[in-house]
Amino acid sequence: MLVHLSVHNYAIVEHLDLELQRGMSVISGETGAGKSIMLDALGLTLGDRADSSVVRVGADKADILASFDLDDIPDARAWLAERDLDNHGPCILRRVITAEGRSRGYINGTPCPQGDLKALGELLIDIHGQHEHQSLLKTDTHRRLLDEYSGSQELARQVQLAAQRWRQTRQALERLSNTSDDQRARHQLLSYQLEELEALALEDGELEQLEHEHKNLANAEQLLGTCRQVLDMCSESDAGNVLSALTSSLQRLTAFQSQPGALGEAVNLLASAQIQVEEAVGELNRFLDHFDSDPERQQALEERLDSIYTLARKHRVQPPELPALQQRLLEELESLNADDEALERLSEELTAYARHYQEKATELSGVRQQAAEALAASVETEIQRLGMPGGKFSIALKPSADGEHPPHGLEQVEFLVSANPGQPLRPLAKVASGGELSRISLAIQVITAQTSRIPTLVFDEVDVGIGGPTAEVVGQLLRRLGERGQVLTVTHLPQVAAQGHHHLFVHKARGRDETHTAVATLQDHERIEEVARMLGGVDLTEQALAHARQMISTAQACAIHA
């Protein structure tokens, strides 16, 4: 709950420190004294928008700090823990607005964006303003209030999430399906091209080997002729050949018994040359004996090379690049196959999400149907107590018109009312007058607040336009809420003020040169005087004081016996 509020240099507030307690705290004061200013300042710590106009004239900044006890708010404690902001003590929200219009927010001393203040603030305080009833004209508000009352916010969130996942999956499936025609054509082309490449089955290094063999076969006759000429020159020519010349030369040199050193070396070299020429002749003969100039082999080589060159031209690549091309086409085909698998997977997911949505939405519908009857009965009882004795209230659940798998469930929620006996139930926006709408709004707020997990409720002049016995009922309703947590109520009605557990009086303190807002906590006699003022005006008569004393005493006595 809210335990402390500190406001510095906000609007006409120079400095304000306010300690707050459990129960119903009434905030009263003259018009213009600044009652709503306090709540506006509190709203800034909860993430409301602000501009430089809120800074007190002459000050450089407005500084508002709100401290909360989180013992009864586990959701807020968990929210802080998830973001490493929990200090295991009071939660302190702070907002600073400079005269230049800059704004800074803090959670437990750590700077944070305005959105974080707002998200955390929704877990800490539920504020009902005097214009809250305007939102009752929207069916979205009707659905939200019903879900809050039934405690099905989490189930509603699951339905919305299931609908979102279903829509996203369907969109992905449609995008993939829209490209399937082009993909099928591409798939067929790739399959055909890969069949050609796989049929070719070109291996690494094969092209170079084929070209080398083909070159040899194409030059076979020239090669054979050259080999025979060399053999003839080396060993077979009768007119003279290399081997015979070497043999004759060795015979002549070795005819001498004694050979000088240089001559002996020459003999050795000639002998070595003779051996090498003989070996060369042997290799040439072996080559000629085994050489096969098969024309069929040459034709097969030419056909194989033609297939390779033709397919390379078809794909506009160099022949050695064909294996790499085949790998790229294979990868692209596998990617298309993966898209086909993705289509199948997305179809299965879409079916699963639709089934999950239907399960959760059906469950939510059952909860709403049951809660709608209970909420309608409770609100009807309260509006009859609030000056509409013949009033009827109902909650209609109609099939949603938001298309397939609507995000907010299978039905639309709409509040129906009959303000006077004998009149049919009609949509709230078309029936209720301003005063009736305000009473209905208050009844709904009070009833739904009883099931709220938020322990601090703020009602800012929600009793405008209500008086007499009805105002006393309003006070009793708000006090009843205060019994379960903390209620802050800004009011002009003495019947409401008398019901409070605590009473805060907002007034203007006038100094020599300026006026500022101050707040006092009223005790027994002071409180009686304030209620008497609210009853009878500025002059406090003994009759007004006695009436005020009786009202407070009766409220407390009723609370004791309740």
Image (cartoon, rainbow, N blue to C red):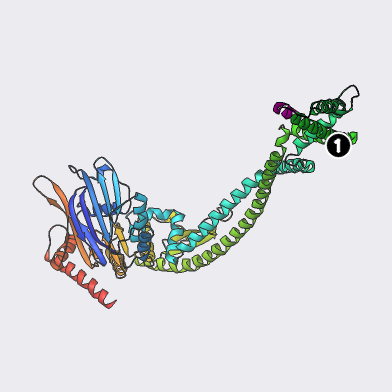
In the rendered image, which quarter contains the C terminus? Answer: bottom left
* Residue drawn at the location 23% of the way across and 47% of the way down: 62
Q: What segment is highlighted magenta in the picture? A: 258-266
Q: Look at the numbered disc 1 and give the secondary structure of its residue.
A: helix
Report x, y in % for residue 322.
Answer: 72, 37
Q: Which residue position is annotated with label 1?
A: 286
Q: Nearer the viewer, residue 494 or 411?
A: 411
Amino acid at circle 1:
Arg
Q: Position of residue 16 (x, y in %)?
A: 18, 55
Would residue 227 appear left or right of 167 to someone viewing this image? right
- Residue 309 is left or right of residue 377, and the answer is right
When the figure is inspected, residue 447 is found, relative to residue 46, above or below; the finding is below
Q: Main secondary structure of the magenta part?
A: helix
* Residue at the left extreme of this rendering: 512
Q: Does the rendering let one see residue 310?
A: no
Q: Residue at x 53, y 59 (%)?
A: 409
